[in-house]
Image (spheres, helix red, strand yellow):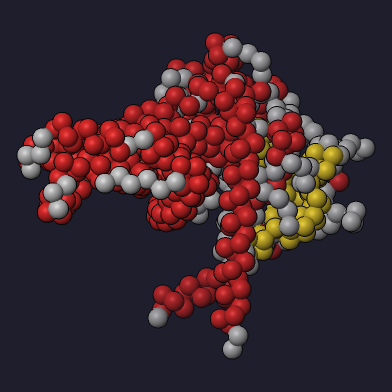
Amino acid sequence: MNEPARQPEATSPKTIPAGEQPIIELRNVTKRFGRLLVLERASLQLYRGQTTVVIGESGAGKSVLLKHIVGLLRPDAGEVYVDGRRVDRLRPKEWVVVRRRFGFLFQGAALFDSMTAVENVAFPILEHRDVTEAQARQIALEKLRMVGLEEFADRKPAQLSGGQRKRVGLARAIALDPEVILYDEPTTGLDPIRADIINELILKLRRELGVTGVVVTHDMASAYKIADRIVMLYRGTFIADGTPDEIRRSADERVRRFIEGRADEEDLASLRAEITK
Amino acid sequence: MFGWVATLGKVSIDQLVAFGDFWQFVGRTLGWMPTGVTRWRNLRLLMPQFYEIGSRSVPVIMITGTFVGLVLAVQAFDQLANVGLQDRMGVLVNLSVIRELGPVLAGVMLAGRVGGALTAELGTMNVTEQIDALRAMGADPIRYLVVPRFLACLLLTPILTFYCDLMGAFGGWLVTTQVFGVPSEPYIYYSAEAIQKWDLFYGFVKSLAFGGTIGWIACYKGFTCRYGAEGVARACTEGFVIGFIVILVLDFFLGLGLKGVYEALWGFKSVL
């Protein structure tokens, strides 16, 4: 049952702080959706204060991995630990305490349509802290100020742009001053300038609040900018782990293809054949 | 060769799993009910639902009731007049509306209007990860989203059914007295004599059951809908069809049960 976690092939000692216990650990996590195998004995240890970026092609299992960390999905096999405590079999009410330590920025921000920006940010504060609505609003406005959106506080999500929605989502993710923030594709769908604003915000949160970050992305510019450590997920398994420089210099063809944005020769050949037909 | 056996087995297992999931969902809703109705913060979530599910359904429910009463009177008048019982038209129209047609048609109308809207709303929240966001923030989506909607359906369906009954009675009276010329006094006299508190209770129990059914099925379908616009559309259709069938099945069994209880307590009652 306590089988040792399978490590990525290219584990870098530079990314693992000596003697430190991981804040989050996934051990041999396997997840299927019907016949589709999304994660296959995936193991990962995440350390306090680091920003770890998980890269990989679409459908590689990156978002599924994040959802296992906060219990939105349960592994079919394997284990998930938070601060050494096994959490993957917790009951819904037990998860509440664990989840208070996490902030989650969803890919589409997942703001509540019926609420204004400030109400969205105040929601977790009202849920978990013994404060009045006025106090919760003040805290929420402070968080919106941190992401530069205080003047949009009373707008509903439909009245905000994609980048603004993500920033409100980020303000909501930090509303309870979490220890760990999980970012699911934070820059996807944004133009390079707005993507850079999000990158700067992620760096600022790490610098000012000291939060541990787990970022799922396939935006390499963003990954190089914000990562202390980059891991690559390929067909449900980790195949690379290292600092941004180590990943940049990786000799693994699958990693090289991904970071250089190069399609597989076989895929290209079959595409050319289709076009010729 | 045995592919169809495997398919049948898979479908049966999937349906059993879904059935089990549904009852687990019902259990979790009931588990959150005490905090759902005792904490002020949770009670405040009820008000918008009361407005959406209750107030906004009043016009369509009243129109339904009126036309049920009108058409019942049109269909029944010739037969009763033929045997000289036109004065007792109110007995037939009002009993039919209060016991059967009011609760069932109000239930079906609400399954379409309210159930469809609830499934679409929760389904959209599901596919846009808003329900996951609630969970990730440590807020139970059943308590936050399902309990207020379920309570609003449960508590307001009987009231809306009462509106439907009232308008049905009015419609029947209108056609009988104003179109067919039956005097109003005997119409009202015989109606009042035939309809007992039990009949109102009968309609109330049914509408309470239909309201709970609509709330649970609609919310469950929204929570379990598949991704994309097609998933939401399919969940809405399935929610309405299943809700409609369950209302009819419940109507039969409740009718049977309540009739048995009445006859055991008071014996057979002749209304004509």
Q: Is residue A49 left or right of residue A253?
A: right
The residue located at (30%, 38%) in the rendering is B194
Q: Determine which quarter of the picture holds residue A34.
A: bottom right
The answer to which image quadrant residue B234 occupies is bottom left
Q: Residue at x 36, y 35 (%)?
A: B196
Residue B138 in the image: above or below residue B180: above
Question: Quadrant location of the N terminus of chain B?
Answer: bottom right
Q: Residue at x 71, y 35 (%)?
A: A93
Q: B67 left or right of A3? A: left
Q: Can residue B116 be seen in the rendering of this structure? A: no
Residue A192 vs residue B244, the one in the foreground: B244
Instruction: Tell me where residue A179 appears, x and y as whole percent.
Output: 73, 29
Of the pair A264 and A69, the residue shown nearer to us: A69
Front-most of residues B5 and A258: B5
Locate residue A127, reporting x and y percent: 62, 24
Q: Is residue A5 above or below residue B210?
A: below
Q: Image point 59% across, 44% down: which residue?
A: B26
Answer yes or no: is residue B198 visible: yes
Residue B271 location, x and y as percent?
Answer: 30, 44
Looking at the picture, how far across and down is residue B10, in whole percent?
A: 60, 71
**Where B115 falls versus A140 (above or below)?**
below
Residue at the extreme right: A19
